[in-house]
Amino acid sequence: MTGKRKSNIGKKTKKRSNPTVLQVLPSLEMGGGGVERGAVDVAIAVAESGARSLVVSHGGDMVRELERAKVTHFQLPLHSKNPWTILVNIGRLEKIIRENKVDIVHARSRAPAWSAFYAAKRVGAHFVTTFHGTYTGVDNFLKKYYNSIQTRGERVIVISRFIGKHIRSIYGVEENRIRLVHRGIDLDRFDPAKVSAERLVQLAKKWRLPDGMSVVMLPGRITRWKGQTIMINALAQLGRHDIRCLLVGADQGRAGYRRELETLLQRFGLADIVHVMEHCTDMPAAYMLSDVVVSASTDPEAFGRVVAEAQAMGRPVIASDHGGVGEMVHSEKTGWLFPPGDAEALAGVLRRVLDLSPVEREVLTKTAADYVHKNFSKQKMCDRTLGVYNDVMASRRTKKRVPI
């Protein structure tokens, strides 16, 4: 993060100058996703603002990033959903909060949030939550109650308007406690100008991509709801063999589903067109090798990080029309949307996008990249989160309302 932050965190407040912020989450594994990435980015931003920044998790590869930024990390089994462990973690967190004079506790996941809520309450620290997804089981009373801990913050951060509407309608959260903070991507990393030709050549060789062929990529874990079967069915209807499709993501032990995909490819005669790749560590280069990036999720995603990353890299995107994706894809202006699960519709949009003229492609991708830079940067996410912390420090009760 570059540049001086405008936040008042780190400056004198009514309670105490240089407030201490503690974030709690299950773990900090590199392949975790938006929860982990957001926590690390905000932790570093808090430290850069002059305030004290602490994180508690079970640990993981990303702890090294925190240590380099002089953010203190405490290791506790916050990844566990065992009721006894959650109960014991209350006392462990209370000790950390007291000893470090923590002002704000920010919970980013349900199991740690239950422990953090009661620990903060015992000490009198402010409690903030981030609601990251829709979660399952809302028709089950016990599951819904378990999920509801993420609505108990003095301020409840939502990562999209879609999630804001969800928690208002399902959990009855008052609008004046909701704060919209879209997830942000690292525009220094996802910058086409910073991807060298050498990186592109190395990845193209690794993936054995032939020269001159259009490449369609669907990034995401190899799991059913990410829509790989929808993609394969769409390609079968598209009927083109002059392209390559890359399904990029780890199966994380879902060997049965991966075999199902391979069987489907054989049945449609697409084994030479579609390739299932393991998790890629150089996604900026992967986007640059692609002519079209597809998000075909069958379940609504809270945000849709892949879409924002691809747009920042100047790639045309096609996405399922539900969830938070609609907040970054304006159909035919910054990308294309299709009805979720509709392989025929996806095939039709693919056909259109693959046939874009160079001028049409340039206009669309520039518009999309500008929109991402304006609305979904890591810096904007961090600044808005620090703004929530300032809001909480100023008063437990505020009349400020954020439209969702």
Image (spheres, rainbow, N blue to C red):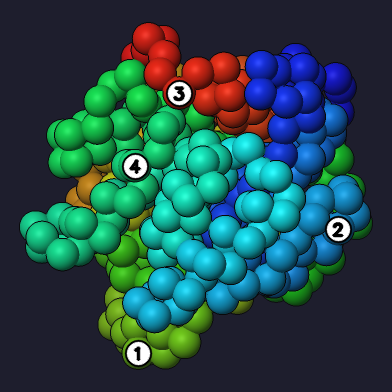
Task: Locate residue 310, reporting x and y percent.
Answer: 59, 41
Q: Residues within 10 Å of mark 4 (few under 14, many from 20)?
A: some
Q: Are marks 3 and 2 in contact (CB under 8 Å)?
A: no
Compared to 219, does 372 lie above or below? Answer: above
Q: Nearer the viewer, residue 316 or 391?
A: 391
Label 2's element? helix
Q: Alpha carbon of mark 3 to alpha carbon of mark 1: how far?
A: 50 Å
**Residue at image point 57% right, 59% down:** 94
- Name which of mark 4 and mark 1 comes first in the sequence: 4
- Name which of mark 4 and mark 3 comes first in the sequence: 4
Mark sitting on residue 67: 2
- Name which of mark 3 and mark 2 comes first in the sequence: 2
Q: Amino acid at mark 2?
A: Glu
Q: Amino acid at mark 1?
A: Gly
Q: Alpha carbon of mark 2 to alpha carbon of mark 1: how far?
A: 39 Å
- Name which of mark 2 and mark 1 comes first in the sequence: 2
- Name which of mark 3 and mark 1 comes first in the sequence: 1
- Name which of mark 4 and mark 2 comes first in the sequence: 2
Look at mark 4 in the image and give the residue it sits on. 152
Disc 3 versus disc 2: nearer the observer: 3
Mark sitting on residue 256: 1
Left or right, residue 233 beside residue 312: left
Compared to 139, does 46 lie above or below? Answer: above
Q: Alpha carbon of mark 3 to alpha carbon of mark 2: how far?
A: 31 Å
Mark sitting on residue 25: none
Q: Quadrant of the C terminus?
A: top left
Compared to 135, does 316 lie above or below? Answer: above
Label 1's element? helix
Q: Amino acid at mark 3?
A: Arg
Q: Nearer the viewer, residue 58 or 90?
A: 90
